[in-house]
Amino acid sequence: AKEAGRNAIRFFDQAMQTTLDRRARLEAGLRHALVRDEFVLHAQPLVDRDSGLVGAELLLRWLPDGLQLVPPDDFIPLAEESGLIVPIGLWVLDQACATLRRWDDDPRLRELYLAVNVSARQFRQPDFVDQVCAALARHGADPRRLKLELTESLLLDKVDEVVFKMRALRLLGVRFSLDDFGTGYASLSYLKKFPFDQLKVDRSFVRDIMSDPDDAAIIRAIIAMGRSLRLSVVAEGVETEGQYAYLIEHGCTLFQGYMFGRPQALSQFEAMLDGCSDA
Ligand code: C2E
Ligand code: CA
Ligand code: CA
Ligand code: CA
């Protein structure tokens, strides 16, 4: 029995070591990923009940040389801890602005907005507003077609500082969406202090609306609340007709999910719309 216990511990140690090794390797790789040009942006459609395709969310992909694609849920937390998310986030913003400018030349793409994920750590940089302005100016992109997705953790920061930055960007026309709504700590009274335009219901609530009455109740409450605060509500992770019908029935009008399109390389996304008159 003693022997078995020792083996279990050794096995555990090895498993831990493997996890730590992988982590250390990823972190080391992440440091060079920008200069090695290993990031790619994918786009996923954002769809309105009445007008069809209205925009796209940019989702970051990392393809380290010689390795398999690393999903964002594996490397974004590492990038956040190490601070690398700041330069990475600036690269994403720059690419977003370049894309918006490129889309200006196409009658179909010109109508769409781009949503960009901004990590709390990036938003907290003292020069964040300047950096966004610089990226917009560098490419001559229309600020009104840029939407920044922030997460609830920011709402625990100093309200005045967050609101100040949001207002400065809103003056230019930039809009804000509160991502992963429902998973964090944002209370209603808190939420109304910040000038958001939109809420995105986390896909963990959407997944089981057809089978879990509690999740269904949460979704209905969020949609109703969004309406009363005059915020648009996007349902994320919509995969089935059933979910879509339920969400429509309860007043949701904006959607994102595999049912409407998976994230795909930007070039593919653009090619898909080439020659399309409607979504
Ligand atoms: P998110 O912002 O909540 O993005 C939505 C995630 O849901 C994406 O995962 C998307 O691929 C996935 N998704 C969309 N529709 C469906 C569906 O119908 N079913 C299922 N099962 N999943 C769906 P992804 O691309 O793996 O990104 C994960 C997270 O990584 C994002 O969650 C976001 O928090 C973060 N992330 C991605 N790109 C960036 C970025 O450029 N900057 C920052 N700071 N974070 C990013
Ligand atoms: Ca998002
Ligand atoms: Ca989300
Ligand atoms: Ca998420």
Image (cartoon, rainbow, N blue to C red):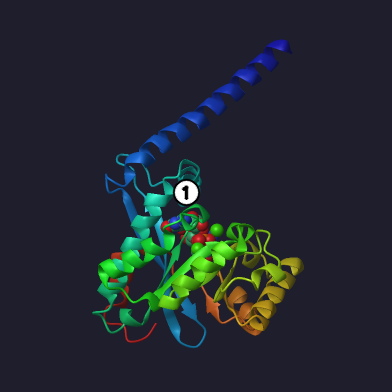
Q: Residue furthest left?
A: 105
Residue 90 shows up from this direction = yes
- The part of the image, by quadrant, that contains residue 53 is bottom left
Q: Amino acid under label 1?
A: Ile
Indicate the position of residue 235 as horizontal and vertical percent values.
57, 72
Of residues 84 and 74, the one drawn nearer to the viewer in this rendering: 84
Mark 1 — residue?
76
Rendered residue at 36%/82% (across/down): 111
Above or below 90: residue 216:
below
Horizontal relation, residue 110 to residue 70: left or right: left
In the rendered image, the vertical position of residue 79 relative to residue 273, given as above or below:
above
- Position of the N terminus, as image quadrant, is top right
User: Which is nearer the eye, 136 or 247?
Assistant: 136
Residue extending farthest to the top is 3
**Is residue 258 in view from this perspective?**
no
Relative horizontal placement of residue 83, taking residue 136 as reference (left or right): right
Residue occupying the point 25% across, 73% down: 102
